[in-house]
Amino acid sequence: MDLVWLKVPQWEHREGLFHGFIGRQGGKSRGGYSSLNLSFRVGDNPELVKDNLCDMKKTVGLHDLRIVTMRQVHGPHIIDIRDKHLKEAGEADGMVTEEREIFLGVLTADCVPILFNVPERKLVAGLHAGWRGTLGGISIKMVNHLRERYDVEPASIEVAMGPAIGPCCYEIGADVSVPMVQKWGGVAEKTLQWRDDRSYLDLRHLNRLQLEEAGVTSEKTYQIGPCTSCATNDFFSYRRRRGKNGLQISFIGWL
């Protein structure tokens, strides 16, 4: 299987840690879903999606294990996962587990997939951060959740942000830029760019700054992969395809 599989170099030496940001190539779906669509909720043939998922899991070495996903709704909810037989966790945009052999999956096509790793605890989390989630500070909510529920100090958290739409392509209107600045002030202003009287947002940078504000060190925050709207041969882009697209997956877990 010819798979686009991006990894965090700093995590590859961790025995038992499986993770990655998977691209759109190597699957069986057709049309706007071509070819490795991994979402059952975008209108694709479910049998092809099932084949895509099985082939992908086999290629990354997780054929007999589950990758749990969420019904992502651009909200603030975070779910704790303990059931190894679970396929979908319900409505949420963040998941956490400290159970071995549970792999958390985040589906995206421009939004930011964020993977969290606490290696000393073998604890992982996955987060879906679009502009609404970012406005609500979902990255900070995850750090607070890990501290309050799992007694994890922010300085021990490692974070990787995968392929997402970049400031080169993510034009936004005042309905987004104004609330961002009102809520996050100078932090948001650092991530806004202005060209030809149009505003553009760097979602990954804003989430990075929010994580730093929550206590995650910049040295443990990694950005992996290109702008999805630029690299449409390798990644799905909702903005580029005007919503007629599949979704790629990012995943993390410990054996």
Image (spheres, helix red, strand yellow):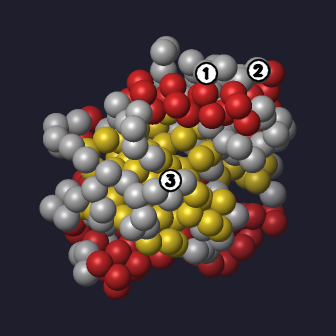
Residue 6 visible here: no
**Please, is residue 78 above or below residue 110 in the view?**
below
> In the image, is 121 to the left or to the right of 43?
left
Determine the CA span between mark 2 and mark 3.
24 Å
Please tell me which residue is depicted at 39% across the width and 67% down the height of the picture.
82
The residue singled out by tag 2 in the image is 30
Residue 11, position in %: x, y? 24, 42
Asked which quadrant contains residue 39, the reply is: top right
Determine the CA span between mark 1 and mark 2.
9 Å
Residue 73, position in %: x, y? 70, 64
Identify residue type, mark 3: Val
Please, what secondary structure does the residue beneath circle 1 have? loop
Identify residue type, mark 2: Arg
Identify residue type, mark 1: Gly
Of badges 2 and 3, the one in the foreground is: 3
Marking on residue 27: 1
Residue 107 visible here: yes
The residue singled out by tag 3 in the image is 68
Crowd class of label 1 (few under 14; some 14 to 19; many from 20; radius 10 Å): many
Determine the CA span between mark 3 and mark 1.
19 Å
Residue 187, position in %: x, y? 51, 68
